[in-house]
Image (spheres, rainbow, N blue to C red):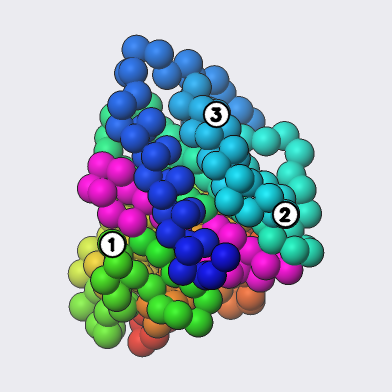
């Protein structure tokens, strides 16, 4: 299977699962709480993940599957690994806020290889293959060339980790003073893609898990941006970290 065929099949699988989100019965979301503040999982998170697991492993049977809603996660060090967030922005989904996405990253020997992020509400599919650029619905995208003072900063509040709350809002205030304005969407995957598309200049969140950024970080980089840990180190897929993503000229 060629890279083009593989990406196309992944996108098709993600689109099918996007329809599950769009057609969700709002009276049957089946909300459960997980560890951490406002950390929810719904029947639909589990349903989308199960469907994605079936479809993605049918496309690439040799891959392992790492989904957010699993208790034990396989190693992504060797071979292919799908790293999946079935509904990034679960609280938004619960509230019918229309800012949620399906995020599918494909790693190869521990390195980010392909990324697909789908916003079903806007029918926007962001894609990237390592070394081949980033795309929105098949059209090339690129980060902006604006400096911070002419930019928008998006941030996530690391909601599940109370210990980061004050530092997060202190940083947001500092960026608010330096940039045009700040935004908070509730979906790190979409935030990263908005940086990639040149809609914002900088995104940060002090704690994310690999399924939050496995796809979106590659899309940013392939769009000409830079993604690092908050301290400037290299992000990895084997453990969570704080994430800073910017265009090439705006490093905070």
Q: What residue is drawn where x is 49% and y is 33%?
A: 48
Percent position of residue 3, x then y: 52, 70
Name the mark nearer the viewer: 3 or 2.
Answer: 2
Q: Is residue 89 visible?
A: no
Name the mark nearer the viewer: 1 or 2.
Answer: 2
- Quick one: 217 or 167, which is closer to the camera? 217
Where residue 169 sits, quadrant-wise, is bottom left
Res. 115 mark: none
Furthest residue toward top: 27
**Which region is colored magenta?**
105-125
Q: Is residue 96 visible?
A: yes
Assign a secondary structure to mark 3.
Answer: helix
Labelled pair 1, 2 in contact (Cβ < 8 Å): no
Write down the residue under mark 1.
137
- Quick one: 127 or 226, which is closer to the camera? 127
Q: Earlier in the sequence, mark 1 or mark 3?
A: 3
Write down the residue under mark 3.
46
Percent position of residue 51, x then y: 53, 34
Name the mark nearer the viewer: 1 or 3.
Answer: 1
Is 138 located above or below residue 131 in the figure? above
Q: What residue is drawn where x is 50% and y is 22%?
A: 43
Q: CA distance from mark 1 to mark 2?
A: 28 Å
Percent position of residue 150, x then y: 21, 78
Where residue 105 sits, quadrant-wise, is bottom right
Labelled pair 3, 2 in contact (Cβ < 8 Å): no
């Amino acid at each position: 299977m060629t890279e083009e065929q593989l990406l196309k099949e992944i996108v098709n699988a993600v689109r099918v699962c996007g329809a599950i989100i769009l057609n969700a019965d709002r009276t049957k979301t089946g909300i459960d709480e997980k560890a951490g503040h406002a950390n929810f999982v719904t029947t639909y998170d589990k349903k989308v993940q199960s469907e994605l697991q079936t479809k993605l492993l049918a496309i690439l049977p040799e891959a392992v599957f790492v989904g957010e809603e699993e208790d034990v996660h396989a190693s992504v060090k060797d071979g292919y690994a799908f790293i999946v967030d079935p509904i990034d922005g679960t609280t938004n989904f619960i509230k019918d806020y229309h800012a949620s996405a399906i995020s599918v990253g494909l790693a190869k020997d521990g390195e980010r290889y392909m990324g697909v992020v789908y916003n079903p509400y806007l029918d926007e599919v962001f894609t990237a293959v390592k070394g081949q650029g980033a795309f929105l619905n098949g059209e090339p995208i690129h980060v902006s060339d604006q400096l911070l003072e002419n930019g928008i900063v998006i941030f996530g509040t690391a909601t599940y980790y109370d210990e980061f709350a004050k530092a997060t809002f202190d940083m947001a205030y500092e960026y608010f003073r330096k940039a045009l304005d700040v935004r908070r969407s509730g979906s790190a995957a979409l935030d990263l893609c908005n940086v990639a598309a040149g809609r914002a200049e900088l995104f940060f969140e002090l704690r994310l898990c690999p399924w939050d950024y496995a796809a979106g970080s590659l899309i940013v980089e392939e769009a000409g941006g830079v993604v690092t840990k908050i301290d400037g180190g290299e992000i990895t897929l084997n453990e969570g970290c704080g994430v800073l993503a910017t265009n090439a000229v705006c490093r905070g």
